[in-house]
Amino acid sequence: MKKLKEAGLFGSGLVPISGSLAQRYNDCLAMLGVKPTALSYFSIDAMGWSPEISEEKNENYYLNVGDANPNAIIISPEQKGKPVFMPSHSFDRDLMHAIFTAYSKQIRDITKDSAICVHLDQHIDAFYSPFDLLKYKHISVSFSLLNDLPKRQKEQKELVKIFNEGNNFIDREIHHKLLDSAKKYGDLRTRKLNFEPLSLNVSSFYTRAFGGVFILRDFIKEIMIFEDIEMFKKAIKDTDHDVMIFHQSHDELMDLLNDHLIAEIDLKSVVNDERYNRIKKQVFAQKLTNPEHGIDEILENTFLFKKYLNELDIETRKEIMGVELYLDKLALSNQTKREDIVSDAYYKALHKPHSSLELEHQELIWKLLSKISPLDILHLYWYDKAQFYKTYLTWNVSHQHWAIETINKAIKN
């Protein structure tokens, strides 16, 4: 992971935390029922998630109390606009943007000497069945302030009121109470500490609950797509819900996505873009075993690419170059069948969200396609970072170098 960090592809864009901010962060963890970190220096994203603490606890989603109701910590206004590295839902980034937009002034004020715990409430105490996800219609976002500042503010105002009554201004006990409160919490009398709950309407979304599930709405029927095969097998037995259920590996799923104008593919045009080149090179890299040259050299050097391609058996060569072979044969005969030449994984990877979809839905479908066939390393990095990091560690050094260079080149362009 060191090379990813040096290339700015892991942990970049985070907010550094140390000193008193680290102590406040631990106090927030205590509010959430999470054990404190022993780290004195770490960094956090927009939701307050820290890669260093995640590694320390060996738990990516340590901020969550169950899958149904995840949490976030806001400890600095600098978190505004930062990435969300380990979202529980596909809408978490937009949710944090809405919070910082609605309460920008309050966040700047409160985080001067306190912090905010954010609770994403689906009005579900806990998940018992994947079909509980169909209840996601509206999400309420509530806020808890460190040290219960609204309550302390009310106490200060009551003390001031008592102080101003009669001769109480000479009462030393009231003096001490006011001074103690002011020293501990500051002067809270005029500060805006009330956060009205935010509400977010939810349509189609992804959640990591139940091993990962996509809920697609606004089509003929609601569609549930499972990552976990065992969860799918349990869900398919249900007869109480009028919903279409698929596992992400099902070929029928791609047919449905095309038929319902959710995804589309045009092999004639796709061969001319960079995404196709990335996918073809990744497929090729996976077929190479103990090459004399580095994978990065082979994939980027035309002569080496041809050399190693021709050293493979003919069926493997056909698989790697399947799209070009199919198009060549199709030009000679319209009876040519795609499935006879282009592998299913390759074919699925070359799909894209349908152009008629709104941008929000396009992002969600890109995420789905990246999970169905994770052959585009750039999209895997963009839409499924956890899986990208996991897969990255299985590659040799030269493969890793090619991936880093390829992603950085695409980002710069």
Image (cartoon, helix red, strand yellow):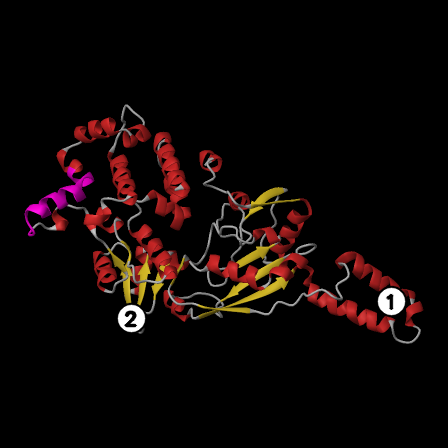
Tell me the number on the disc at residue 124.
Answer: none
Residue type beneath disc 2: Lys
Identify the residue at image location x=28%, y=64%: 245
Q: What stretch is highlighted in magenta?
A: 318-335
Q: Position of residue 175 (x, y in %)?
A: 88, 64
Residue farthest bottom in this picture = 166
Identify the residue at image location x=33%, y=57%: 365
| Tag 2 residue | 221
Q: In this view, does 330 lie to the left or right of 267?
A: left
Counting labels gives: 2
Q: Which of marks 2 and 1 is nearer the N terminus?
A: 1
**Element under disc 2:** loop
The quadrant in which the N terminus is found is: top left
Residue 264 lies in the magenta-colored region: no
Quadrant of the image occupied by residue 299: top left
| Neighbour tally class for label 1: few under 14, some 14-19, many 20 plus, Cα within 10 Å | some
